[in-house]
Image (cartoon, rainbow, N blue to C red):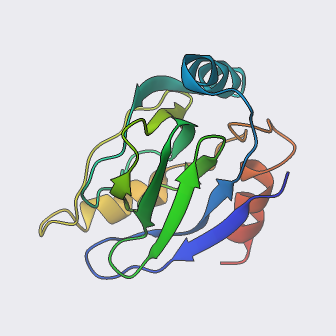
Amino acid sequence: MKPTQYVFKDDGLIPNNSLPLLLYQQVFDQRGNGGAEWLINCFAINNWTNAWKNGVFSYHHYHSTSHEVLGVYSGNAKLHLGGEQGEKLDVEAGDVIVIPAGVAHKNLGSSRDFMVVGAYPYGSSYDMKTGEKGERPQADKNIAAVPIPATDPLLGKDEGVPVIWKDQNNRK
């Protein structure tokens, strides 16, 4: 199970991150409430907790104090990732997105039934940033202090996040 990787540069408003966003496509079969429960359990087994169920906001936002995972369990959407200069990606039920701290995400449009489960490594607290003046340089300091998780929300400790992000971090 190899994710597609996307790296987004700082655009002046959105800091983004040198760690790649990871998109796992069609990695689970359950849909609806069963899919949501499967995601919550899978994420929790891998120490990604503080889970919630909802959609994705229709404005650019990012978290400077935590990484985030989004598992799509219903519907589909076009997400704008990485801020205005980023990528517009189609996601659908069965997809999982691991978003590094500082990487913006926004819903550009979705089906009526679009729903995700979100969670955070070790149940960490997250803040809400929108690229407003005055957020930085504190947001940059926060992002730099967020550790690479020891586990991937889907694959555990031997694949995905801890391997890809550690390798990427060592290249800096």
Residue 105's image quarter?
bottom left
Residue 170's image quarter?
bottom right
Q: Residue at x 19, y 62 (%)?
A: 135
Q: Could you tell me if residue 103 is visible in this image?
A: no
Q: Residue at x 45, y 44 (%)?
A: 66
**Nearer to the camera, 45 or 165:** 45
Q: Position of residue 107 (x, y in %)?
A: 35, 55
Is residue 4 rendered to the left or right of residue 15?
Answer: right
Q: Is residue 34 above or below residue 8?
A: above
Q: Quadrant of the C terminus?
A: bottom right
**Nearer to the camera, 93 or 9:** 93
Q: Could you tell me if residue 134 is visible in this image?
A: yes
Is residue 100 rendered to the left or right of residue 111?
Answer: right
**Nearer to the camera, 3 or 10:** 3
Q: Is residue 3 above or below residue 121?
A: below
Q: Is residue 148 above or below residue 171?
A: above
Q: Position of residue 15 (x, y in %)?
A: 36, 71
Is residue 71 rendered to the left or right of residue 30?
Answer: left
Total marks drawn? 0
Q: Is residue 151 above or below residue 164?
A: above
Q: Residue at x 80, y 55 (%)?
A: 163
Is residue 41 rendered to the left or right of residue 78?
Answer: right
Q: Residue at x 75, y 58 (%)?
A: 3
